[in-house]
Image (tube, rainbow, N blue to C red):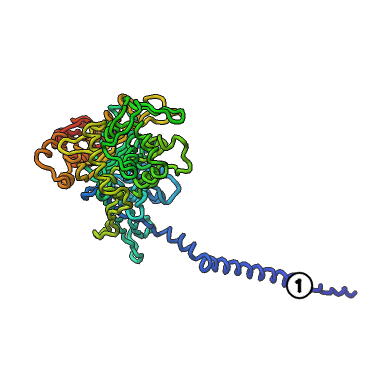
Amino acid sequence: MNEPRTTPEPTGTSDHEFGLRLGIMAALMLLFCLAIVTRLLGIQVFDVKKYRAKANRQYEVVVTEKARRGRILDRHGRPLAESVESISFYADPKHVADADAAARLFSETFGKNKRIYLDLLRKKKRFVWLERNVPVSQAEKLMSLKIKGISFQREQHRYYLNVAAQLIGLTDRDNKGVSGLEKSFEKELRGRDGVRIFQRSATGEIYPSPDAEQVLPLAGNDVTLTIDADVQGILEEEISLAVANFKASNAMGIVMDVRTGEIIAMANYPTFDMNRRKGMTVDQMRNRAVTDMFEPGSTFKIVMASAATEALGWRAETPVDGHGGTITLYRRYIRDHEPFGALSFQKAITESSNVVAATTAMQVGAQTFYNYARALGFGQKTGVGLIGESGGLLKPVARWGSLTLPWMGYGYQVMATPLQVLQAYATLANDGGRMRPFVIKSVTDPEGKKVMENAPLKVAQALKPETARYMAREYFRAVVEKGTGAAADIEGIPVAGKTGTAQKLHNGSYQGWSYYVASFAGFFPYDNPQYAAIIVVDEPKTEYYAAAVAAPLFSRVCGRAVACSLEMQKRLSMKAPEKEALDRVSTVIMPDLRGLRQSEAAKLLEWYSLVMEPAADSGGGYVTAQSVAPGAQVGKQTKVRVTLARSVQNK
């Protein structure tokens, strides 16, 4: 029997499936290759900068080397602000082998809790600051140790000699100016930072990159002021004592060269410690001498006297009527401190008659009075160039009310800054020529080349020279010789000027004797004026008349200034008897040294013409105590014994 034949199964379907699968695999491989190529193009072509920077961060360290910030100097080249080298420590936590040991070492060196450093060293970052702006002497030990993952860089921090705080201003932690001249001259002072590039090995070791271009830092320019540090210190001491003695709210003072417009000193109180800044407020930082406006009171009578002398042709002997000390204008009373009757114009000024000032202003006329006020610099900025300067408030005639002119005659319904009032008296002293006040003498580059220099600038001829000389002699010298300004005179130097006791508007009223501004503005010597000064004491409580508050303060400030300034003595052609009289007031106020480093304290005492004598058992470092109490008035060359400790003690 024959077996059936078997027919082989067709293979077409199997070959088709195999080909399909092979095609799919080839397509997937092609897509995979395209993805790789696209990714490589992205890395090597399109995003090359991004990945190159990322790679560089793995093995490159870029360290900014801060430029030395320029100094701020007084008119004699003495540093008021300078940059001191300090050390800052930083770490790469990833490469710190023993974080606990490193934290303990930093804790022992700087007296902080170990946990602070340990937390920093455990951060998942490649860069953390451990300490900033550490004195070199305190950092020396750590600098000598090579701790894996921890490095340091030299930085600059600002050190101030603690005078003219509001004028000079401050820098922040990054040495950038944030107020005063530090801010307005930031571009000139800051210099150009350098850049150093280091490479990091696989083990975390850092070494200078041999191929990278290293940019060296360029120091900032020095800024020289017109300020005399000695006169500035005296002015600050005296106004701070006045605030304490009269229980005043604040005080201001300015000393100015009438021939050039140079500001010799500009002080405000309250002030602050420029190096510690603890408890510092915005109010303390305000330069009141140029920002604060007040109704000047009788010091503004310079406008009335100028207009009467030139426009009306009045002389010292011109008779005027005091109306018995009271006059009624538009149902409002104007009163004097005494019941003056008929008197001379000179006596009306020396005795500061408000009634005569008001009636005289009305005779001058509104537009003429306004023109003289503007000519003397009121109602406009002086151009001193300081941050926050106010232009005061002198309303245009069209906005005057019926009482504006008579009240303005004796210094109300007008607002002025202390600098504006001083500028008016300096104008009178300078034969009627109004000079622009300025505080910047020059800017010098690191090589000693002057890149900017200020020159005296005459803004206007406000008064005829003969008018100015006549007024100085007959009116404002007479105020000091036999009027309300007698206490402003300086032994051996004839002074001219004017007192001002102005009630302040408080809660919409002028009532209440506690709210006064006492001021004195004057110049010396009256027959050949060289310097002018103004003192303003705000809300004195124990006394409020300027004759008792501001005038004697003017005398002490200017007398001591001349006694200690050889430049002033030369300008004034001081004779031996006069100099001997001034030497008797040549004392200084003891500064507070506590918390300063030994070198800083020694420099500050030298600046005040005092001598530091460390105690025998002192260990060096920071001042913790001083033998003469801060604020005490002592003679020059007094020896001051200080106690020193290795760390700063809280006061």
Amino acid marked by disc 1 = His
Residue 56: tell me if it is visible.
yes
On screen, residue 320 above or below 147: above
Q: Residue 173 versus residue 40: which sits nearer the camera?
A: 173
x, y percentage for residue 210?
33, 65
On screen, residue 189 above or below 634: below
Q: Residue 69 versus residue 22: which sits nearer the camera?
A: 69
x, y percentage for residue 233?
24, 39
Q: Residue 412 versus residue 400: which sits nearer the camera?
A: 400
Residue 292: tell me if it is visible.
no
Mark 1 surroundings: few (<14), some (14-19) or many (≥20) residues within 10 A: few
Q: Quadrant of residue 281?
A: top left
Left or right of 615, for residue 288: right
Q: Residue 189 versus residue 525: which sits nearer the camera?
A: 525
Q: How many marks?
A: 1
Left or right of 172, for residue 466: left
In the rendered view of the protein, which quadrant contains the C terminus?
top left
Which residue corresponds to the image point at 25% horizontal and 41% vertical from the top-left?
Answer: 472
x, y percentage for residue 152?
32, 50
Mark 1 — residue?
A: 16
